Amino acid sequence: MNQYETVFILTPVLSDDQMKEAVEKFKTILTEGGAEILNEELWGLKKLAYPIQKKSTGFYAMLEFKAEPTLISRLEVNYRRDERVLRYITVKNDKFAAEYAEKRRNKRANANKED
């Protein structure tokens, strides 16, 4: 199994519940395909660098997971079919990126414990 990160941008016209439901949909696709979700980050509503479909903002979400390579194509087909997704990118992490992501997760977990 390889380690991947996927970031996708959802349309800003969604309510918080609709946004969370869309993220859950993609998490379910991954877990049903045998993926192990390592980290989930909802970055919230951010300004886009350029307008996409006449929208200047979007909800950003990032999922970090371990999966078989065949699952990626199924995930990306679902991104394309879902009209709520403006853009997406999925990258395979090499060993250095995986180490960095783990450090970032640990740093974030420690920061949350201190709050």
Image (cartoon, rainbow, N blue to C red):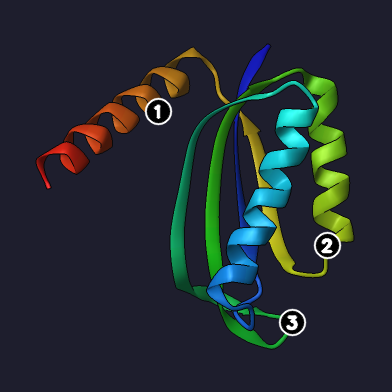
Residue 35, position as x, y percentages in the image: 69, 23
Q: Is residue 82 left or right of residue 26?
A: right
Q: Residue at x 17, y 40 (%)?
A: 111
Total tally of numbered discs in the picture:
3
* Labels 2 and 1: the sequence-earlier one: 2
Q: Which residue is most to the left?
A: 114
Q: Which residue is mark 1?
A: 101
> Alpha carbon of mark 2 to alpha carbon of mark 3: how far?
14 Å
Report, in whole angstroms, how far the alpha carbon at label 1 lies from the one at label 3.
31 Å
Q: What SS does tag 1 mark?
A: helix
Point 76% across, 17% down: residue: 68
Measuring from the top left, give residue 72's x and y in whole percent: 79, 32
The residue identified by callout 3 is 53
* Numbered tag placed on residue 83 in the rendering: none
Q: Earlier in the sequence, mark 2 or mark 3?
A: 3
Q: Secondary structure at mark 3?
A: loop
Q: Residue at x 75, y 69 (%)?
A: 84
Q: Reading the chain from its start, which is encountered first: label 1 or label 3? A: 3
Residue 69 left/right relative to 23: right
* Mark 2 burial class by Cα count in 10 Å: few <14, some 14-19, many 20+: few
Q: CA distance from mark 2 to mark 1?
A: 28 Å
Q: Measured along the vertical axis of the image, is residue 14 above or below residue 80?
A: below
On screen, residue 100 above or below 55: above
* Quadrant in the picture for residue 43: bottom left
